[in-house]
Image (cartoon, rainbow, N blue to C red):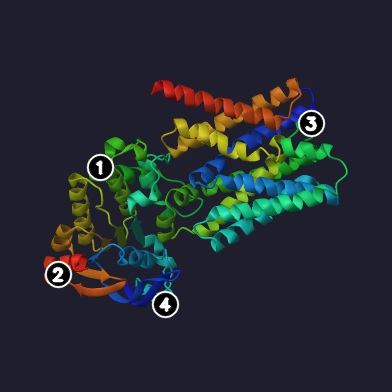
């Protein structure tokens, strides 16, 4: 399996994404803003559509459009203070509407499917370089703002009072989510990216009593699911997005059952 | 230390604070009292900078621009409304959050910081729960953890919004002991409370509020419980 170059790329990309996605996903879970993953993944699909239409690398398109909507989201949230979900719905619908229009202008549907459900054979050398170029600063930012992000997730008011730049960090968080979605698109696909952001954290929350363990366990769960999902995708010839998320759901159910027995 | 000049604040069309003028000196323990909906928590939120006043000026440390002084301020919010019991955070991690503003970006916690956590938890009789999940503690213990988080940074201005609501007598006793210790260190304390005992025993200044206005500002000596009850029950 590893003698194939496309599998080597799939594993490298998959391992990078499986470490970064839960690290940032855990913050949006704790901020009770998990839906942002769904919303921005729709924006990523629009970016892919624009990329394919304009003949540029769809990952570039996805990153650019997702970051644009992540910034717009923060602005809209301020307009609907206390009703953040309205801003999420507006961005989701806007992305879907434009995606529908742009996709109707694209002739080939095969490449579109790869971006919706992921593909292990489609990761090009350029994609891998782009994933690495985005992953390194993303991981650096997550580590640099780790304690500040935890503070605003736990108690935004107290963080604000003691001088933490809450507005800036919320913006950073949105942009980080956008970046993770952009680079995860190839492996998991636009429809299932938010599962990679949320599911590892959902499993880890069941067995963690502190934030450090939440981060550790969610990475382990994510890494295991992504690696196993890619292997399953190779041998069973199924979409990696589907296999990865199915494994995540299976782990979640197992943890629920085992926790129930312990109780 | 804290000065409000003609401050007003509204939630959409509901006026919450009307032309508030007050001055709290350095080292004072100031208590804000009044019936529910009188504007106490809004007043505290305006002082903290959570809400920006529609009108008027809020001066902290003698300045209108408080950004440089924010690290010297600690806030203890109403616990129940601000904290999700399932949040995966330990007591130690919660208390360390109090040091985040002082550390600044890019810096991690040192062994010195961890020692400070141990000291403050020891003081608040919480050391045995250090590694426990915050949500698994009792209401009183959780409130003490929030107070530990506020005190670990040794603030010059400490603001507490109803810190004694729903807590046991042991926690209450520890809280007041600590507040007096802070006062002795010249920390300015602003506290919203319904606890008449605290008002009479500890306060230097009492601000009585009703319908978004300050009815009276007096010292503990002049404060009459009878008058206080009138504010509550005359309607």
Disc 1 vs disc 3: Cβ atoms closer than 8 Å?
no
Q: On the rendered image, what quadrant is the N terminus of chain A found in? A: top right
The residue to which callout 4 is attached is: B55
Q: On the rendered image, what quadrant is the C terminus of chain A found in? A: top left
Front-lying residue, B76 or B6 = B6
Q: Residue furthest front?
A: B235
Disc 4 and disc 2 on one polypeptide chain: yes
Disc 4 vs disc 2: Cβ atoms closer than 8 Å?
no
Q: Can the viewer see residue A203 in this picture?
A: yes
> What element does badge 2 sit on?
helix
The residue to which callout 2 is attached is: B227
Query: How many residues crowd mark 2 within 10 Å: few (<14), some (14–19), many (20+)?
Result: few
Q: CA separation, marks 4 and 2?
A: 30 Å
Label number found at residue B122: 1
Front-lying residue, B165 or B134 = B165
- Residue B227 relative to residue B208: left or right: left
- Residue A188: % across, % down: 69, 35
Q: CA separation, marks 1 and 3?
A: 58 Å
């Amino acid at each position: 399996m590893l003698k194939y170059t496309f599998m080597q790329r799939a594993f490298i990309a998959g391992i990078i994404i499986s470490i970064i996605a839960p690290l940032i996903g855990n913050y949006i879970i704790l901020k009770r803003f998990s839906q942002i993953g769904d919303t921005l993944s729709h924006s990523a699909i629009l970016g892919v559509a624009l990329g394919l239409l304009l003949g540029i690398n769809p990952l570039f398109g996805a990153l650019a459009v997702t970051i644009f909507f992540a910034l717009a989201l923060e602005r809209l949230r301020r307009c609907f203070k206390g009703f953040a979900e309205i801003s999420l719905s507006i961005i989701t619908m806007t992305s879907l509407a434009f995606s529908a229009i742009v996709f109707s202008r694209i002739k080939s549907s095969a490449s579109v499917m790869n971006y919706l459900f992921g593909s292990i054979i489609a990761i090009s050398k350029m994609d891998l370089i782009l994933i690495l170029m985005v992953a390194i600063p993303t991981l650096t930012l997550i580590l640099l703002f780790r304690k500040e992000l935890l503070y605003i997730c736990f108690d935004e008011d107290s963080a604000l009072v003691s001088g933490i730049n809450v507005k800036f960090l919320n913006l950073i968080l949105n942009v980080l989510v956008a970046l993770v979605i952009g680079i995860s698109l190839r492996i998991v696909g636009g429809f299932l990216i938010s599962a990679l952001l949320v599911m590892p954290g959902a499993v880890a929350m069941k067995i963690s009593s502190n934030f450090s363990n939440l981060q550790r366990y969610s990475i382990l769960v994510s890494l295991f699911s992504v690696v196993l999902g890619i292997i399953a995708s190779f041998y069973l010839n199924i979409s990696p997005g589907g296999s990865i998320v199915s494994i995540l759901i299976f782990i979640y159910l197992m943890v629920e059952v085992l926790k129930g027995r312990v109780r | 230390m804290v000065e409000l000049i003609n401050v007003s604040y509204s939630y959409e069309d509901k006026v919450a604070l009307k032309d508030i003028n007050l001055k709290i000196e350095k080292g004072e323990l100031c208590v804000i009292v009044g019936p529910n909906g009188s504007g106490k928590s809004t007043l505290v939120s305006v002082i903290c900078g959570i809400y920006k006043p529609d009108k008027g000026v809020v001066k902290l440390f003698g300045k209108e621009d408080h950004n440089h002084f924010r690290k010297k301020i600690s806030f203890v919010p109403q616990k129940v409304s601000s904290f999700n019991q399932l949040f995966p955070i330990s007591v130690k991690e919660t208390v360390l959050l109090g040091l985040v503003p002082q550390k600044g970006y890019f810096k991690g916690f040192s062994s010195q910081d961890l020692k400070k956590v141990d000291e403050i938890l020891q003081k608040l009789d919480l050391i045995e729960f250090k590694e426990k999940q915050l949500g698994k503690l009792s209401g009183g213990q959780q409130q003490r953890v929030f107070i530990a988080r506020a005190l670990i940074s040794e603030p010059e201005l400490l603001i507490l919004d109803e810190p004694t609501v729903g807590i046991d007598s042991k926690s209450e006793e520890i809280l007041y002991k600590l507040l007096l210790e802070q006062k002795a260190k010249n920390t300015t304390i602003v506290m919203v409370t319904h606890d008449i005992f605290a008002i009479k025993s500890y306060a230097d200044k009492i601000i009585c509020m009703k319908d978004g206005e300050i009815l009276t500002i007096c010292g503990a000596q002049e404060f009459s419980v009878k008058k206080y009850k009138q504010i509550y029950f005359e309607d």
